[in-house]
Image: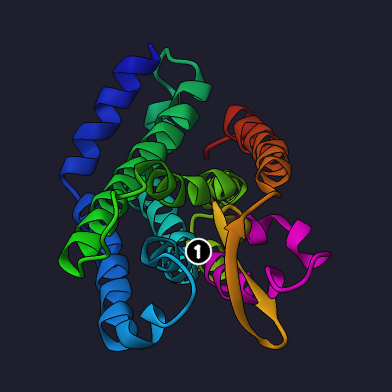
Amino acid sequence: MVNSVIAFEKKKLKRTFIVPLTLLYPFLVIFMVALIIAVQKDNLANQNNDMWEIMIVITHYVYMFAIALAITFITSNIVNIEHQTNSWKLLFSLPINRSSFYFSKLFSIFILCASSAFIVFVGLNLIGIVFSFGNFPPYLLLLKESFYPYIGALPIITLQLWLSLRFQNQTLPMAIGIFGAVCIFLLQTNKVSSFIFWAYPAMMTPLIQVVENDSLGKIVVNSDLYLYTTLSLVFAFIFMFIGLNYCSKHQVE
């Protein structure tokens, strides 16, 4: 039953601009990272750090903001297909469990996010090759940098999906998503505020650069990944339950 709804969802997405625009933003992320490295390569090379690791740190500062914006765009536009066509009443009248429609939307978002993450992974490898970083590419680290922020973004995905379902006018969900994306920079700078779920994409990086004497120091492994993964899953399930409950009980006029 769920599979048939997912297949129907795929057909709808093919008739929209959502997929190409969603897959465009990881290319913009890669372009920005490549541009920063091209301009600052000499200065970066003087740091006592591996260039692959430096690229991961640079990528994360661009990536964490782009991910939140992309999720806001994806969820709003996927749900807005039904809002614009006023097709909720027709869909909910079908002999299919309403939760199937919710999970079909969620599955579509996950697929688009995973596709974007894979593009970033390939792009990071290409940057290292083009700029001759040397050494063997740290594939595991690059995979973590590409996909881990999306694990941290699970609460944002489920929250934005619920908001997009709740409000027919997508102005408010979009505004909340954009505001949250902007706040990521502030939230991740403080240990207390980093526990707010909007900061989790920023906290889910395999490497962090330590600040020593008001200057950038060595790059070390992020020891808080398990903590923020757990928190992300907890908040994601909470928002998913709220969204699923709303979808199941909502009365369409």
* x, y percent for residue 46: 41, 83
* x, y percent for residue 29: 32, 67
What residue sits 25% from the left and 24% below the top?
A: 7
Q: Is residue 148 visible?
A: yes
Residue at mark 1: 64
Q: Secondary structure at mark 1?
A: helix
What residue sits 77% from the left and 57% below the top?
A: 195
Q: Is residue 178 magenta?
A: yes
Q: Looking at the picture, which amino acid does disc 1 mark?
A: Met
Chief SS of the magenta region: helix
Tell me, what colour scheme is on the image? rainbow
Total numbered circles: 1
Q: Is residue 86 visible?
A: no
Left or right for 176, reference 144: right
Q: Is residue 27 magenta?
A: no
Left or right for 103, reference 55: right
Query: Label 1: how many residues lie within 10 Å, few (<14), some (14-19) or many (20+)?
Result: many
Q: Nearer the viewer, residue 35 or 44?
A: 44
Asked if 242 appears above or below 131 in the picture, the reply is: above
Asked if 152 appears above or below 183 in the picture, the reply is: above
In terms of image quadrants, where is residue 123? bottom left
In terms of image quadrants, where is residue 41? bottom left
Q: Nearer the viewer, residue 152 or 252?
A: 152
* x, y percent for residue 91: 39, 28
Asked if 47 appears above or below 114 in the picture, the reply is: below
Magenta region: 177-200
Quarter containing the N terminus: top left
* x, y percent for residue 207: 55, 57
Asked if 158 appears above or below 180 in the picture, the reply is: above
